[in-house]
Image (spheres, rainbow, N blue to C red):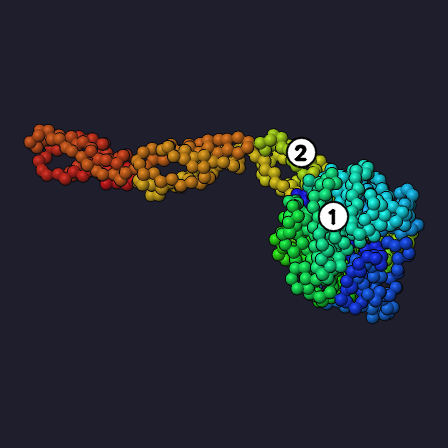
Amino acid sequence: MIPVLVVLNMLVPALPRAMEARAAPAATPAPVASPSPTATPTPAVSPSPTPKPTAAASPSATATPGRVPPPPPAPTPAPPAATRTSPLQAAKPKAVARPKSDPPDISWVRQFGTSGEDYARGVAVDGSGNVYIAGTTFGNLSGQNAGSGDAFVRKYDSSGVEQWTRQFGTTSEDYALGVAVDGAGNVYVAGYTQGNLSGQNAGYSDAFVRKYDASGAELWTRQFGTGSDDRALGVAVDGAGNIYIAGPTYGNLSGQNAGTNDAFVRKYASSGVEQWTRQFGTTGGDEAFAVAVDGAGNVHVVGTTIGNLSGQSAGGYDAFVRKYDTSGAEQWTRQFGTTGGDEPLGVAVDAFGNVYVGGDTGGNLSGQNAGNQDAFLRKYDSSGAEQWTRQFGTGGYDYAFGVAVDGFGNVYAAGSTYGDLSGQNAGGYDAFVRKYDGSGVEQWTRQFGTNGGDSAVSVGVDGSGNVYVAGYTNGNLSGETGLGGTDAFLTKFAAPPVAGFSKSLNPSNGAVPNTVTFTDTSTGNPTSWSWNFGDGTGSSSQNPTKIYSNPGSYTVTLTVANAAGSGSTSQTITTYTAPAAGFTKSLNPAGGVVPVTVTFADSSTGSPTSWSWNFGDGTGSSSQNPTKIYSNVGNHTVTLTVANPAGSSSTSQTVSTYAAPAACFTRTLNPPGGGAPNTVTFADTSTGNIVSWYWNFGDGTNGSSQNPTKTYTMAGSYTVTLTVTNPAGSN
């Protein structure tokens, strides 16, 4: 496969305005109100000591950055079944390719909580497939609750078995909003506290980041802030163990605050030592929601701005994504949006530095808005050039809260929908996860939930392509029993297995009979194996052995399957017998008169894989069917040696080349004066490799010797003709 990409922060949820915990106190500078006359409805509210508003509650009249408007009003009663039209049917179709594959099945669901309110906010997956979720509980999830709301982090193995839970907080309120994990299994939890989690609280709310080792032992905690309100909403970790957190600040965290509230990103070394902080914004109000880091240590922050952070504001809230290098130097900023308000709530980076931003829009970011609020996903390349945008939704409200990318460049968006995004809505808000390939083509969508309201907040993916979605529910997901008003949940969507195998030939040269041992190397926990050996036979064993008796090339295919689906892969096996060399030759001209062009045609048997020609004149060739020009007269011994993994063989033939024959002779008379009778001796002096002679003695007699003797008994004049012949002709 695909390198398995390790995207260190693709598992960190972006906390939108819609999901922050509570308003700042009166003493805190108030954020600038949204230009919109009414609040943007959101799928679920952040934890609060009071019960969460139901889907039937009316929206707030106004909303401010980083605060929680309640969900939208309950939909009007449905028309009779005969006339019912879903919001998805009523929406304008999107110009995006439809799914290429069926959505994966749910492998397992873990719903947990207390008699109070419990919310999962972030999910991360390590290289071993262990899953970490972070959030907030208003009960005793693990030990005595320290105050109103406590933060927690929980670890599961890949099978969904709980490994440990850490609940922590102060006598005030504490919220864990993001989680990340490094290559050594150390876990980082970020959020904010209104108490003294680690040192004296600097103001109303302080940001914090806490590090645990793989066994759940706390290593250090860093709490920081200003005299106002400061929150860590996203966390990421790079390959060197450096930690990055992002969020909003209402004070002067690093330099002068540009307006009501600014965005910030801070870098810590693995030891917890601050490396740098970047605070930025406009006079209109700005917030950072999520952070991601690529393999080179470049940091990507997404959030919202009411001002002109980079270019002219489109209206209301605009989205932004900003890239810093590992030293904190800004590389580029992209601001985008519509007049309807736009929030980027999640960010991920792939192995090539491409940046994926997910969120929601109240306008037409890419195509016609399907309803009140649409989800979107946008891709930038590493230089900040937009590659594509996908806007999707229903006639209701749709939000993408989390973004992840796998090692093959597929991107996943998770969130909530108030309509029928994929299948019938179960009631209120449903959770969803959608997969696109790297080109922005939708692969599948999975919508799931209960009649109580459900929100997917964060998404992660492991090296095998299994997808993990975290969030919270007011119902009983997949038969899990609800423990309170709102429970946290973690859902695993199992990816189909990825087929793979290795092979070992005995003998290793492929000579038949050959015993081939196949070893399954598939990933994704297949439960069945189907082998096609390419000769009409097969096996259902995991690691079969096959004897090939006949030489040839065989395409071997392994298909593996489990409850999530199936996958196949093929390899070619070639077996041999030792070759027997043979060839034919064709001369042009056929008589072999130089220069002569000889075309050699291999006629060897046994499937040779290499050819070595010796043309008998110091030259050669490795072509199967070479051509040779002979310019010199002679007999040339041509040898062909063929080989394959099973052995080699040689054969030789002679190629004779000639000059054209030229007849010539001398004569000697005896007696020399020519008196009759006279014996004449003829001496052939012809050239050209003569092979036959024909003498016409001019008296009706002839001879075929090279140097004949002729006795003339009668006086007279005789014309003697010699005709000589060689393979090239006669003269």
Circle 1: is it few (<14), some (14-19), or many (20+) Cα within 10 Å?
many
Left or right, 213 with respect to 452, comes to: left
The answer, for residue 486, to whether it is visible in the render is: yes
Secondary structure beneath label 1: strand
Question: Percent from the top left, x then y, of residue 689?
Answer: 27, 34
Measured as percent of width and height from the top left, residue 505 is found at 62, 32
Going 81% across and 38% down the picture, which residue do you hit? 218
Q: Residue furthest top?
A: 671
SS at mark 2 in the image: strand
Residue depth check, mark 1 versus mark 2: number of the one nearer the observer:
1
Q: Nearer the viewer, residue 608 or 249?
A: 249
Relative vertical location of residue 372 with respect to residue 706 in this rendering, above or below: below
Residue for point 86% across, 54% down: 47
| Total numbered circles | 2
The C terminus: image quadrant: top left
Mark 2 highlights which residue? 517
Relative horizontal placement of residue 367, taking residue 141 as reference (left or right): left
Closer to the N terminus: mark 1 or mark 2?
1
Q: Amino acid at mark 1?
A: Ile
- Residue tagged 1: 245
- Foreground residue, 77 or 536? 77
Q: Are marks 1 and 2 in contact (CB under 8 Å)?
A: no
Q: Nearer the viewer, residue 175 or 586?
A: 175
Measured Cα–Cα span from mark 1 to mark 2: 51 Å
- Foreground pick, 141 / 639: 141
| Labelled disc at residue 63 | none
Q: Residue at x 22, y 32 (%)?
A: 706
Q: Quadrant of residue 360?
A: bottom right
The kind of residue on which mark 2 rests is Thr
State the residue at coordinates (76%, 39%): 186
